[in-house]
Image (cartoon, rainbow, N blue to C red):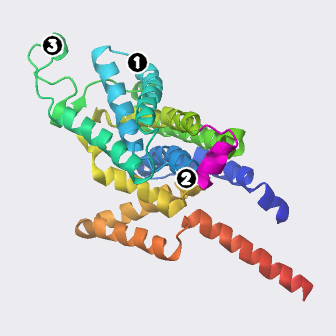
Amino acid sequence: MALFWKHRDFVIFAILLGVALAFPFMGIPRFILAAVLIMYCYATVVSQWNLVFGLAGIFSLAQVAIFAFGAYSTALLGRYLEMNLWYSFPIAGLGGILFSFLIGLACLRLRGIYVALLTLAVSQMMFVLIQTDAACSALNKAINPMSCVSFTGGSQGLGDFGSFGWRAVLGGRNWMTGDYYTMLGLLVIGLIVTYLITQSRMGLAFRALRDNEELARSRGISQYKYQLLVFGASAFLTAAAGGFYAAHFGAVGINLFGFPLLLFLISMLVVGGIGRLWGPLLGAALLMSADEVFKEFSDWRNVGLGIVVLLFMIFLPDGLAGGIDKLHKLAVRVFTRARTA
């Protein structure tokens, strides 16, 4: 048992990966497969948010803006440059790094709630700019003289920018399996990157700045350097997940900047366990499952999700992952006492 707990992350990863790889061949209904696919997408975003908020202790709300930036970048590259989405969504990820650096530079001298307010303001500024973009763009006129669509699509959203091409490869009924494995690949990369950063010297510096910034700075750890690093390290996969989201649905809209998505994602982080490796995945799985259940009671959907989050904040403030750790420590303590009695 002690050996298992020592290598638990590797064992859990291998088991979950095996189940995830076999999942599409278990006779699962398409709507469940689609929900799990989106859960992977959200878990990827939340896992990267966990690096910024949980590991580095920076109360940033920019992750949703970076996610939306990746989605819109993929859509714009596909629509106006006719770029294959297999190229455009990783390019959107690189653009997300540059975008996150700009946000990180703006936040360098801010702390706590002021970082949250500034990053939220960035997201809302993008929302307003896209929503008020109503002028007919010259590029859209060149593509289709009969259409009048703004450059970003405005409040109507933007579509007709291509897909991953799985319909042509796998057929009309099985195309979602291709999207499923694409998103699973992103999630696996995200979990590996999170683990490696957490176990590295960089992760140690993040934790030092989070726990005692003054002491860390006195030891030569640059707060500015590592804040920019964590913003950039978390941005690529967040923006790439946004690009995948756009490609999967074939459309993007201003709802990506909305408060419902922001609150849903941060609730996954709280429910799963802030700063825990498996917290984002556990939180995403639980809240996506709860959301599917509450869809049958649309009038009470938001209330039900709010109650779930509230119960966790009261009874499991460390989230699911923290609760599992506490149970393990309690079991070890009971077992040790039983042996010594």
Tell me if residue 31 is in the magenta stretch.
no
Element carrying mark 1: loop
What are the residue bounds of the magenta stretch?
205-222
Q: Residues within 10 Å of mark 2 (few under 14, many from 20)?
A: many
Amino acid type of the residue that numbered disc 2 sits on in the rendered structure: Gly
Left or right: 323 in relation to 263: right
Q: Position of residue 115 (x, y in %)?
A: 41, 46
Q: Based on the displayed image, in which of its 4 quarters is residue 87 positioned?
A: top left
The residue that disc 3 covers is: 138
Q: Residues within 10 Å of mark 3 (few under 14, many from 20)?
A: some
Vertical arrangement, residue 64 with respect to residue 166, above or below = below
Left or right: 279 in relation to 170: right
Q: Is residue 253 something one can see in this rendering?
A: no
The residue that disc 1 covers is: 84
Q: Looking at the image, which residue is at 32% across and 13% down?
A: 81
Q: Is label 3 or label 2 in front?
A: 2
Element carrying mark 2: helix
Vertical arrangement, residue 308 with respect to residue 148, above or below = below
Contact (Cβ within 8 Å) of mark 3 with mark 2: no
Left or right: 148 in relation to 238: left
Tell me if residue 213 is in the magenta stretch.
yes
Amino acid type of the residue that numbered disc 1 sits on in the rendered structure: Asn
Q: Position of residue 45 (x, y in %)?
A: 47, 44
Location of the N terminus by quadrant is: bottom right
- Closer to the N terminus: mark 3 or mark 2? 2
The residue that disc 2 covers is: 54
